[in-house]
Amino acid sequence: MILNSCNRCYLTLLLCVAAAAAGSVPDDSGESGPTTRSKWLCDSTDLCLPEESLLPGEGHEQPRHRYESQRDCRLSCGKYGAIWPMPTGECSLSHDRVPFDPWKVRFNVVAPNEVTTQFLRETNRLFVSNLLKECIRNCTLAASKEVLVKATVTDSSLVLDWKTDESYMIVVRTTDKVSFVDIKAATVYGARFAFETLSNLVTGSVTNGLLLVSSARVTDQPVYPHRGLLLDTSRNFLPLRYIRNTLDAMAASKMNVLHWHVVDTHSFPLEITRVPEMQRYGAYSNAQTYSHTDALNLVKYARLRGIRIIMEIDGPSHAGSGWQWGPSAGLGNMSVCLNQSPWRNYCVQPPCGQLNPINDHMYAVLKEIFADIAELGAPEETIHMGGDEVFIPCWNRTEEITTQMKARGYDLSQESFLRLWSQFHQRNVKAWDDINLQMYPSVREPKPVILWSSKLTDPEYIEQMLPKERFIIQTWVAAQSPLNRELLRKGYRILISTKDAWYLDHGFWGNTQYYNWRKVYDNALPIDAPNNQKRQVLGGEVCMWSEYVDQNSLEARIWPRAGGAAERLWSNPKSSAYLAERRFYRYRERLIARGIHPDAVLPHWCVLHEGQCL
């Protein structure tokens, strides 16, 4: 009895301590400043500071406008307020606010046909969903003004490619009873980006409802048409939920291409309906797969967020798992050097595997894979065919390849292997053309395909190996490499993934270095010459290779750093990361509100005390 009584007393004490501790934990979901109910001011250097820090008589010019919170202040402190990425055209933002209830936003869509109208209605739904996530307390506001949003689109097409017009204009004005928002864009994608910007003109009120800038005018369009993120789901499988989260964060950042590196030598998780053996032999397990329907739904999910999904089927290197079944099916060795050891003699990374360029059955299977990929995308969509890190000693150690090369009159020099490699890509491009002509006969112009930079794309070889009309080169060289400049001079179109700034896996393996968001942001890109009639610099991608990341660390590894690349690709700002940092911190907070888990970039104290840390 005494023991039971003591236990009850001890339990009561624990509960009391726990309750007291719970009451003392600060709530990080809202704002907490130096003084809980202090007003905030935007000073002459565009810092949002609590009112008591700008006392009269200390040489400070007292700002006229006072805001209820730091986030309220940030909406119009500085030319671009809280907009991310930075607009490239006109941007004027009022210092006054309109309290409103997100449920009292009304939409009027003016579009040329039913499909564009339906697209914009879905955009409206996603916009309201994002607004609701900004509420700090109760979204309901009894005395709310009505907010009337009119979105006008003139182009009836849903085509999303490097030629799509993504420009938009937003005008916000407010009367005694109503706030009017007028959005104009050529395409539904420009309108979607306008709604994203409009969400950046809103924040939660410390009481109820939301706050909107009372008047604004923004004209905007991206500098680069390809603003991408590579996601590798082969080294470590990523569940669909995390890929959708990645797409949501990309949408918040106005990025428009998910480069899905879906297969590699490690695993082949993607279902190929025409060749089910690929997934059967290549997936880590039956649970770690993407069905054809999964992939199709993901493409649709992305498209509603203004994002293309470009699938990569890597080859001839990085092709092992999924290709093992050739001999048992009577198709010969479709991949060679499979799982050879010591691996350093056969590939650049274990497990080894490289497609057999003299096996016709391999090309037939690859064509079936390409046909499945073509079905997944829109008629205008292209494919990434890999092409990096081909390990010539693998082919040179494979007797059936060297014997056939000699029979065809080749010697075994590097130039001969490069020629064989080039023929591999050109044969696959011909297969891709045949598929698209049959599947999408209305698309007359052959679609260029994307390849990684490699020995084959060296300036001394590329013009003899890869015709510039058919191949776009994605470079993954260091910032100081002359390769981009030399490829542009030769007339090639390029995508840029600067490996010493935009490889987000670096810093976690080998002798690599971690790149913080400032390094990502300040990575300068070349631009086309003003008199260049043909766009050559299409844009770029940050890359999340997954050797050392899975769903448990994915979001913090990518975000918010990828947002630095998003502004670089949208705006190509002349200013440095230092001038963008307050907008960047607010951008990170929006990602959190939308259910993303970005990494921390500095102590929260520094966010609340602008200008006092860095």
Image (spheres, rainbow, N blue to C red):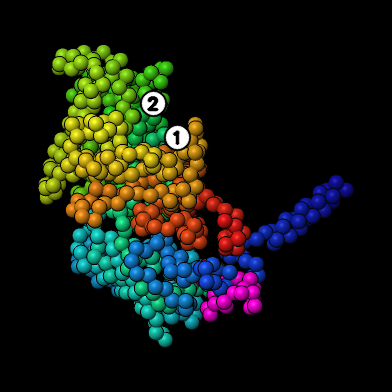
Quadrant for the C terminus in the image: bottom right
Q: Nearer the viewer, residue 501 or 443?
A: 501
The residue shown at (12%, 43%) is: 437
Q: CA distance from mark 1 to mark 2?
A: 14 Å
> Seen in the image, is 154 located left or right of residue 3?
left
Q: Which residues are magenta?
A: 50-72
The residue shown at (37%, 79%) is: 173
Q: Nearer the viewer, residue 22 or 556?
A: 556
Mark 2 is on which residue type?
Val
Q: What x and y, as percent, mark residue 120?
A: 29, 65
Q: State which quadrant residue 112 falls in.
A: bottom left
> Any magenta on residue 82?
no
Mark 1 is on which residue type?
Glu
Q: State which quadrant residue 188 falls in.
A: bottom left
The residue shown at (18%, 14%) is: 406
Tag 2 residue:
348
In the picture shown, does residue 303 fall above or below 198?
above
Q: What type of secondary structure mainly makes up the magenta span?
A: loop
